[in-house]
């Protein structure tokens, strides 16, 4: 394999400044985990529990070179029960990996290697991230990669920049992953500039939900907008509706920023393996529904329509989305947000997204080992199944975009004098 030297100097300021870093001329995105045979079998068979991999033979190799591995952790919730595990990686020194276009290198200290075990034809996350990028919400680096364990091909993985690394780069001091019932999961705190106590950040996040039952209309909008970037949140909600995202409450990170001297949160969406769902998550599953407005439950989709009307909100499982759907002032602002970004997206943009997806994922579907590994996933796959799914989803997204535009136009016509 051929290499060339990149000297890190003044013009490229990275954390490994003045060190010599080797970068491949051809980046094939190959990762290999080296562990003992006993650990390999344990990784395949373990279920239910996330854990840090501890093994005397442990190494993570990228592009045939050993990385400066600090920690690799088996992660995820439902995917823990699958043979192909997902991993969270922390490095003492960064790797440099090419972006999806092959034009620029990204420096990464921390990232996730997502197995896509529940991601139909390995494309749902990529499609959703692409649409989120279109509306300016997805900021994380991501790309498909190869992953091996002790020389055994594990199939196609999606590498995603660790949200915690991203928030540090943005100057934030606190990030959390929202859990059900506005709980806090996977939070990280690193005071550097403002030295605001961790509990103050947590309390500010909880205020978002505590004020929901007590305010309404413009007062509610103003109070929420001081605490969370509603422009970003509205756009995420719109993409969730477009893609029929069936599982979203615990799939979003909130990271802190200071706006006019007050703590506010922006969001990073996460994990879109359950899109194009028939029903939202709350139908028939009351355990995850927020309780700020009392005990809510929905046995059918019609129960949701009976409560909030046929709004362009796919799920009201979380209390914040529920409040936006039921409050006429908030919902009007949400529809205004939809109108703004829907005007920017053309059918050609959808075609371009699918063309890029085919270019990125297509080579993996030429590998027999990738197809063989899919037997361990929720849905075994094949090149024919993938191509059929691509064609179907391309049409679905275009049709739903057009439907949303028509519905908004009707609403605007009804409001005109």
Image (tube, helix red, strand yellow):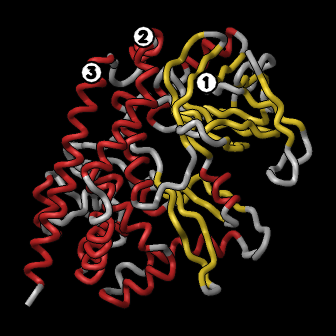
* Residue linked to disc 3: 385
The residue beneath circle 1 is 28
Compute the Cα span from label 1 to label 2.
20 Å
Q: Is residue 23 left or right of residue 311?
A: right
| Left or right of 64 in this view: 376 | left
Asked if disc 3 and disc 1 are in contact, CB closer than 8 Å, the reply is no
Residue at horizontal 58 percent and vertical 33 percent from the top: 113
Task: Characterize the local packing of mark 1: few (<14), some (14-19) or many (20 or more) Cα atoms within 10 angstroms.
Answer: some
Callout 1: helix, strand or loop? loop
Q: Earlier in the sequence, mark 1 or mark 2?
A: 1
Q: Earlier in the sequence, mark 2 or mark 3?
A: 2
Report crowding for label 2: few under 14, some 14 to 19, many 20 or more residues within 10 A (C-alpha): some
Q: Is residue 408 visible?
A: yes
Which one is in front in this view, the residue at disc 1 or the one at disc 2? 1
Q: Residue 191: x, y in percent?
A: 76, 67
Report, in whole angstroms, how far the alpha carbon at label 2 lies from the one at label 3.
14 Å
> Where residue 412 sits: x, y (%)?
14, 78
Dividing the picture into quadrants, the one containing residue 161 is: top right
Residue at mark 3 to residue at mark 1: CA–CA distance: 25 Å
Disc 2: which residue: 372
């Amino acid at each position: 394999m051929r290499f060339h030297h990149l000297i890190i100097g003044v013009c490229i300021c990275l954390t490994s400044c003045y060190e010599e870093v080797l970068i491949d001329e051809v980046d094939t995105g190959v990762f290999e985990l080296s562990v003992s045979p006993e650990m390999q079998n344990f990784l395949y068979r373990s279920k239910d529990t996330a854990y840090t991999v501890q093994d005397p033979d442990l190494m993570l190799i990228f592009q045939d070179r050993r990385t400066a591995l600090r920690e690799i952790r088996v992660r995820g919730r439902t995917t823990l029960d699958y043979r192909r595990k997902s991993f969270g990686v922390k490095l003492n020194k960064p790797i440099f990996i090419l972006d999806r276009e092959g034009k620029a290198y990204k420096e990464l200290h921390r990232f996730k290697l997502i197995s896509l075990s529940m991601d139909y034809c390995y494309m749902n996350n990529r499609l959703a991230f692409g649409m989120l990028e279109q509306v300016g919400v997805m900021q994380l680096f991501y790309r498909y990669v190869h992953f091996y364990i002790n020389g055994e091909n594990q199939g196609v993985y999606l590498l995603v920049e660790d949200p915690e690394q991203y928030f540090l780069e943005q100057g934030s001091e606190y990030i959390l992953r929202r859990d059900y019932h506005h709980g806090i999961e996977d939070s990280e705190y690193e005071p550097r500039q403002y030295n605001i106590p961790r509990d103050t950040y947590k309390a500010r996040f909880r205020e978002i939900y505590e004020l929901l039952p007590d305010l309404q209309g413009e007062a509610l909008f103003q109070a929420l907008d001081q605490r969370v970037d509603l422009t970003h949140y509205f756009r995420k909600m719109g993409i969730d509706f477009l893609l029929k995202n069936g599982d979203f409450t615990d799939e979003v990170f909130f990271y802190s920023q200071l706006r006019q001297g007050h703590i506010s949160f922006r969001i990073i969406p996460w994990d879109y393996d359950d899109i194009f769902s028939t029903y939202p998550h709350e139908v028939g599953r009351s355990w995850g529904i927020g309780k700020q407005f009392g005990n809510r439950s929905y046995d059918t989709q019609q129960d949701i329509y009976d409560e909030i009307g046929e709004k362009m909100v796919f799920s009201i499982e979380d209390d914040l989305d529920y409040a936006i759907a039921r409050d006429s002032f908030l919902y009007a602002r949400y529809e205004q947000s939809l109108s703004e970004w829907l005007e920017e997206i053309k059918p050609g943009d959808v075609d371009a997204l699918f063309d890029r997806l085919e270019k990125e994922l297509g080579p993996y579907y030429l590998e027999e080992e990738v197809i063989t590994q899919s037997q361990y996933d929720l849905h075994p796959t094949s090149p024919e199944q993938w191509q059929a799914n691509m064609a179907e989803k391309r049409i679905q997204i275009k049709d739903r975009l057009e439907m949303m535009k028509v519905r908004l136009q009707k609403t605007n016509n009804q409001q005109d004098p």
